[in-house]
Amino acid sequence: MVKPYTWMLGVYWNNVIDDGHGGTYLMDTKKSWNLPKLPSAVNVDVYLLKGMSIDVIGSHNYYELGKRIDKDTTVSGQFFSFKTHFKYSFGYILEQQWFDPFTFAGVGYTGREAIDPQSMFGLSFGAGFNLMIGGGLGIQVRGSGNIGVLSKDSNYGHAHFGLIYKVPDLDKKKSNHFTKRKYQWGFKRPRYRKPSSRRM
């Protein structure tokens, strides 16, 4: 397959579910979702080969007073995270890119003012998909689980959805179609030996 991109850039909304109840209130948008009004996450994806890439994403959010934060509704504060993932896109083996599901896993740092301890180093893993619109522009949706490496860390869920742009492979060699024999009208024509006449 042709290398689908060199770099992929993304701008997202991000939703953090950090209520301390696992998936019990996963769809409680009023009390468990922390969703900013404007996009507040950015992503850079560096393509390696055969569907594999390195994915780096940074996010900012804010926990509002009254939301469930680690089973508490009386705290608020800033949230930010920085994560690096190894990512595999299944569009490679499907031999198409317009719908490209993927999985990823990696490590990251999370800072949360509303939770003690405020700093967390942990593991991040999840899945998502790209839906391409055209001209390198597309939509990406992804969700991840984030687990702290220390016993006191509070795990959380993180979802991203927004726009992506695939920067094409600028190092791709130019086509040499006009060097083929049928286009060599600018070169010297080959000489042909006139066949000798036969005597009757």
Image (cartoon, grey):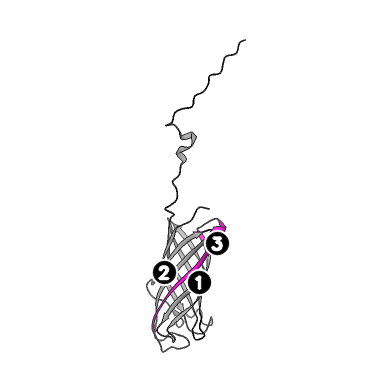
Magenta stretch in the rendered image: 73-99
Q: Which residue is mark 2?
A: 12
Q: Which residue is mark 1?
A: 106
| Relative height, residue 39 to residue 155 (above, below) | above
**Amino acid type of the residue that numbered disc 3 sits on in the rendered structure:** Phe
Which type of secondary structure does the marked residue at label 3 adopt? loop
Q: Residue 67, image x and y in percent? A: 43, 84
Query: Which is more foreground, mark 3 or mark 1?
Result: 1
Q: Mark 3 vs mark 2: which is more N-terminal?
A: 2
Asked if the residue under mark 2 is in contact with the one under mark 1, i.e. CB atoms within 8 Å, the reply is no
Residue name at image x 53 percent, y 56 percent: 96
Q: Mark 3 vs mark 1: which is more N-terminal?
A: 3
**Amino acid type of the residue that numbered disc 1 sits on in the rendered structure:** Gly
Instruction: Say which of 111 and 114 sits in front.
Output: 111
User: Is 44 placed left or right of 100 in the picture?
Assistant: left
Q: Mark 1 vs mark 2: which is more N-terminal?
A: 2
Q: Residue 153, image x and y in percent? A: 49, 84
**Quadrant in the picture for the C terminus:** top right
**Amino acid type of the residue that numbered disc 2 sits on in the rendered structure:** Tyr
Q: Which image quadrant for residue 46?
A: bottom left
Q: Is residue 79 magenta?
A: yes
Q: Is residue 95 magenta?
A: yes
Instruction: Say which of 24 and 119 sits in front.
Output: 119
Residue 90 — which label?
A: 3
The residues bearing labels 3 and 1 have C-alpha atoms spaced at a distance of 18 Å
